[in-house]
Amino acid sequence: MKNGGERVMFDTIHHIAIIGSDYEKSKHFYVDLLGLKVIRENYRKERDDYKIDLACGQQEIELFIIKNAPARVNYPEALGLRHLAFKVESVDDTVKELNGKGIETEPVRLDDYTGKKMTFFHDPDGLPLEIHE
């Protein structure tokens, strides 16, 4: 892709990988509650884990279910990926829908730099997820 005549090395994000610890809880959360669609699902016998590829708009989320993965460090935050943010039309409507499904959310606030509404919630393993207008 070109940007003002210059080659852009990276055009978009292809996928984001998430590690979950419990197959049923993680799949239920991402598929049944958040509504992501399963593209493919594979049990990897050599690793004794699952890899579920989920559609999220034009991108994919690779959901790995690994039984004995170490717990995520939350506070203080460690180096690495901080959180995953989903773009939504209405944070208020999405919060109501998430809360109606039993998913707790933090209070809605405005992004200091964009002025758009945003908030956070967590997946079953404590991974911070954000919704942002």
Image (cartoon, rainbow, N blue to C red):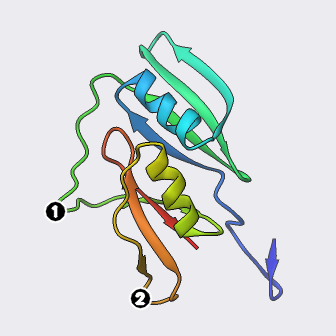
Q: In the image, what residue type sits under mark 2?
A: Asp
Residue count near mark 2 (Cα–Cα under 10 Å), binned few <14, some 14–19, many ≥20: few
Residue in the picture at 71% in, 53% down: 57
Q: In the image, what residue type sits under mark 1?
A: Pro
Residue count near mark 1 (Cα–Cα under 10 Å), binned few <14, some 14–19, many ≥20: few
Where in the figure is residue 60, as x and y percent of width and height? 64, 45
- The image quadrant that residue 36 belongs to is top right
Residue in the picture at 52% in, 88% down: 114
Q: Nearer the viewer, residue 48 or 127?
A: 127
Residue in the picture at 42% in, 68% down: 119
Which residue, as the protein is rendered here, is positioned at the far top? 45
Could you tell which of marks 1 and 2 lies nearer the N-terminus?
Answer: 1
- Mark on residue 76? 1
* Discs 1, 2 touching: Cβ within 8 Å: no
Which residue, as the protein is rendered here, is positioned at the far left? 76
Which structural element holds mark 1? loop
Which structural element holds mark 2? loop
Check the image and report above or below for 120 versus 39. below
Q: Nearer the viewer, residue 41 or 32?
A: 32
Where in the figure is residue 122, as x and y percent of width and height? 36, 50
The residue where tag 2 is placed is 112
